[in-house]
Image: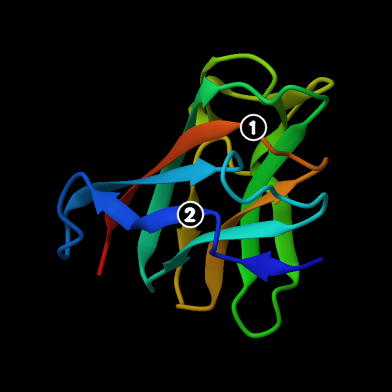
Amino acid sequence: MAVAKTYVVGDGEALGSANTGKAFAKRFSISAATTGITAADVVKLMEVPANVLIQDVIVNVTTVEDSTCTIDIGDYLIADDTASDLDGYIETLDVESTGVKKTSDGLKEGSVTLGYATGEFYPTHNRYIGIVVNNTADTVVFDVTVVGINCA
């Protein structure tokens, strides 16, 4: 597994305030069309500051992948890139079709609601939000918006 931020265009567009007690959203654009993404690569989106509640992760696929490809979105330890819950926010999202999917849809695996379907609170600054690409990708383009509240 390689961890890279090279597939993310920019550092994320702030869509709201990250000040204490404020809700925020940050949008990241990911493009495999220019660089290609190798299967099992982790795309590092953002480190989560201490005392932040991530409420939702939203994916908008704008250009589809031309072959079988799914992604998982979860969190990873900053110290060693170990997955804490690699699919805690979104599991096995098919990027072969356009559209919007989000954590708060109450995504399920069988009859079990996925771990972070109601949000995840981070009391310390030790994790980041990441995307694992389960298959090699070379055409998909999508935006990921992370929505949260700074509770500090």
Picture disc at residue 8: 2
Q: Residue at x 81, y 54 (%)?
A: 40
Q: Amino acid at mark 1?
A: Thr
Q: Amino acid at mark 2?
A: Val
The residue pinned by badge 1 equals 139
Q: Is residue 66 left or right of residue 16?
A: right
User: Does residue 130 sit above or below 32 in this rendering?
Assistant: below
Q: Is residue 135 left or right of residue 78?
A: right
Helix, strand or loop status at disc 2: strand
Image coords of residue 152 (percent x, y): 25, 70
State the scheme by which the image is colored: rainbow
Element at label 1? loop
Identify the image quadrant of residue 42.
bottom right
Q: Would residue 137 appear left or right of 32 to someone viewing this image? A: right
Above or below — where is 21 with respect to 108? below
Q: Quadrant of the N terminus?
A: bottom right
| Residue depicted at 53% across the width and 78% down the height | 126
Using the numbered discs, state the Cα–Cα distance from disc 2 to disc 1 in whole angstroms.
14 Å
At which x and y percent is residue 129? Answer: 54, 58
Q: Is residue 82 left or right of residue 6?
A: right
